[in-house]
Image (cartoon, helix red, strand yellow):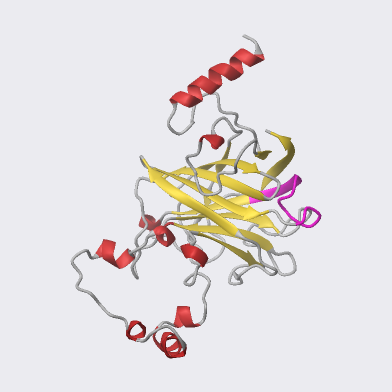
Amino acid sequence: MTIDLVRTACALALAASALGATACDSRPDHVIARRASGELPRTDPLSSAWDGLPEHEAPLVAQNVIEPHLTEASVTKIRVRALHDGRWIAFRLEWEDATDDHNVTTTVFSDAAAVQLPRTREARPTIMMGNDGTPVDILFFRAAWQTADNMGELYPNMPPIHHPPEAAAEGPARQEMERHYQAGVGAQNPTVVRPDGASVLAFSAEGYGTLSPPEGGYAATGRGVHRDGRWYVVLAREIGEAASSPVAPGRSVVAFAVWNGSNGEVGSRKNRSEWIELEIQGGGS
């Protein structure tokens, strides 16, 4: 069978598969980001643009270095595909998770995922969120951030509750009340006051306990879909200046993490990978 016929057979198999997972998928030993031939699916993990791309399967282990530990991995592998268009790069993550944990309480946690990159391509900081003087960039997705009405879903028969700031009209009076009654809003906590209700945020870190908005800033976006016992999540970020960006065409490394909310995973209790080689191709796909 010629190469063209093989490609045709794979394309037909992919078209018959709702989520594009077939025996024709390429499984390279590292993550390959091809250049998109069309629109980059920055917020659509089920887009046909992901079909047929090289897919790296990365093993995950329980984070057991920084306390509190995760004693045993609840997610042991993650499948990764990547695309870029010269301006943005997007990572499509897929993993098994029987429960869609998108509601949170003080004791119930959200499913989540993260992509970690060294701030500079040549750097190889510790996998544990970087280290002093060698920062990492982190894209973080949280399923709960896609929930429009967390309390309404948890308690559908709950009577209306009016929060004190809602009694004041927009303006200085309301802002003052928010500082007293909604500390996260008053402090402009980026995980509370998210642009356009984003489900993916950008951070930087130089070790555990140092997570903060990235210096200089860069835009991030994405979205997740839970279907048939699996998560499909896109996390995307701007590439920025090619000379200084860790995600411009060339070679770097990347790492991933997943949180299974129903397993009590939050904060440092997570499933993580090691550094994986990242190849960002410059030509067409």
Taking depth in this image into account, of 9 and 175 the one nearest to the observer is: 175
Residue at 20% from the left image edge and 70% from the top image edge: 158
Horizontal side, residue 255 vs residue 102: left or right: right
Q: Quadrant of residue 165?
A: bottom left
Residue 192 on image: x %, y %: 47, 72
Residue at 47% from the left image edge and 89% from the top image edge: 172
Residue 213 on image: x %, y %: 61, 69
| Farthest-out residue, top | 1
Taking depth in this image into account, of 4 and 277 the one nearest to the observer is: 4
Residue at 40% from the left image edge and 60% from the top image edge: 144
Q: Does residue 20 appear in the picture of this structure? A: yes
The C terminus is located in which quarter?
A: top right
Residue 187 on image: x %, y %: 51, 81
Q: Does residue 73 appear in the picture of this structure? A: no
Q: How many labels does the image show?
A: 0
Range covered by the magenta-colored residues: 241-254
The N terminus is located in which quarter?
A: top right
Establish if 252 lies above or below 148: above
Horizontal side, residue 274 vs residue 187: left or right: right
| Farthest-out residue, right | 243
Residue 148 lies within the magenta run: no
Establish if 117 lies above or below 132: above
Prevailing secondary structure of the magenta residues: loop
Taking depth in this image into account, of 76 and 223 the one nearest to the observer is: 223
Establish if 84 lies above or below 265: above
Residue 242 lies within the magenta run: yes
Q: Quadrant of residue 35?
A: top right
Q: In which quarter of the image is residue 107?
A: bottom left
Residue 59 on image: x %, y %: 55, 43
